[in-house]
Image (cartoon, rainbow, N blue to C red):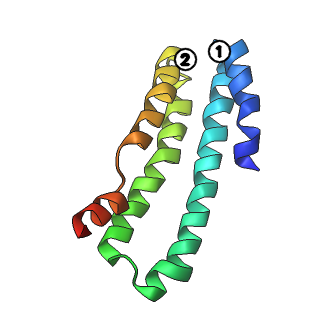
Amino acid sequence: MCVAFIPYPTELIGEYGTSLPVVVFYGLTLALTGFAYNALWFYVVRRYITSEKIIHQETVQKATIWTLSYPISYLVAAGLAFISINLSIVLYILIPLFYLLPGIIDKQLMEQV
């Protein structure tokens, strides 16, 4: 449901991008979506990855930190809106670019090949 809600704050920031409440709302929405993703990640780790030892425990820990960094980054960007709305928007643009980088698990799987 969080992902389905993202177009609404995106439209708001497109229309009222200079409004502090809108910029903060956008960041909080993406942070909430990231934390919902992390809840799914923790479930999968506990239920499948740890019990079946699919991936090394050290890799799981690094991947957990990596996945938590995204919603935390959105929270930081939302907080920075109180200092500079433009800086916050720049961070909102830059954060998704890190999704293009290979993650910790991707790197481990490439090493196994």
Q: Quadrant of residue 13?
A: top right
Q: Is residue 70 above or below residue 104?
A: above
Displayed quadrant of residue 53: bottom left
| Residue 99 in the image, given as x and y percentages of width and height | 44, 42
Q: Is residue 42 left or right of residue 11?
A: left
* Camera-side residue of 43 and 81: 43
Q: CA distance from mark 2 to mark 1?
A: 8 Å
* Nearest to the observer: residue 97 or residue 34: 97
**Disc 1: which residue:** 17
- Kind of residue at disc 1: Gly
Query: Is 16 displayed left or right of 86 in the figure?
Result: right
Residues at circles 2 and 1 in contact by the CB criterion of under 8 Å: yes
Q: Residue furthest bottom?
A: 51
Q: Residue at position x 61%, y 40% from top? A: 30
Q: Decide: few, some or many residues near mark 2? Use Cα within 10 Å; few <14, some 14-19, many ≥20.
A: many
Q: Which residue is mark 2?
A: 85
Can residue 16 be seen in this snapshot?
Answer: no
The quarter of the picture where residue 109 lies is: bottom left
Left or right: 57, with 80 as reference point: left
Q: Earlier in the sequence, mark 2 or mark 1?
A: 1
**Residue type indicated by callout 2:** Ile
* Residue at position x 56%, y 81% in the image: 47
Q: Nearer the viewer, residue 22 or 70?
A: 70
The label nearer to you, 2 versus 1, is: 1
Q: Secondary structure at mark 1?
A: loop
